[in-house]
Amino acid sequence: MDCEEDLFCGLNYADKDPDEMDVLEKKHTPVIDVESLGEDRYRVTVKVGEYKEHPNEHNHFIESIELYSGRTFLGRATFASARSDPVATFEVKLDHKHPFVAFERCNMHGTWRSEEVELG
Ligand SMILES: [Fe+2]
């Protein structure tokens, strides 16, 4: 198997409209919602399974979600299998306007990247 066929080799990214995604892409692509709180503060919610619900079982689940602004790490949430839904809300204060981007890790299907979301 070469790297392009291996979900665990590199970063998976569905750079397309959700209507054009396949089932795997719909289940894994993180979706970012941003609410401005004023004075450079933001409430950012990242959800996996927005387009199609991802399984949440002991042998197949979302292990973590990470949030960045550009290359600046902002936070990480880790989840228990079966008991924690893969959604995380971060409240952050930024001194720059780099777009938000999120990553999630599935124990069976590797790491997936969201679309970039510009700061409002
Ligand atoms: Fe998965």
Image (spheres, rainbow, N blue to C red):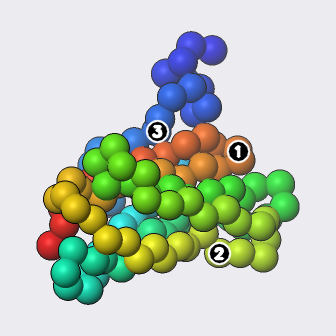
**Residue 49 vertical placement versus 15 (above, below):** below
Amino acid type, residue under disc 2 in the picture: Asp
Amino acid type, residue under disc 3 in the picture: Asn
Cβ atoms at labels 2 and 3 below 8 Å apart:
no
Between residues 46 and 73, which one lies in front from this camera angle?
73
Residue at x-position 27% and y-position 65%? 94
Q: Is mark 2 within 8 Å of ligand 1?
A: no
Q: Which mark is residue 12?
A: 3
Residue at x-position 61% and y-position 31%? 8
**Residue 53 vertical placement versus 58 (above, below):** below
Q: Position of residue 11 (x, y in %)?
A: 47, 35
> Pointer 1: what residue?
108
> Pointer 2: what residue?
85
Q: Is residue 51 left or right of residue 118?
A: right
Residue at x-position 15% and y-position 73%? 120
- Which of marks 3 and 1 precedes in the sequence? 3
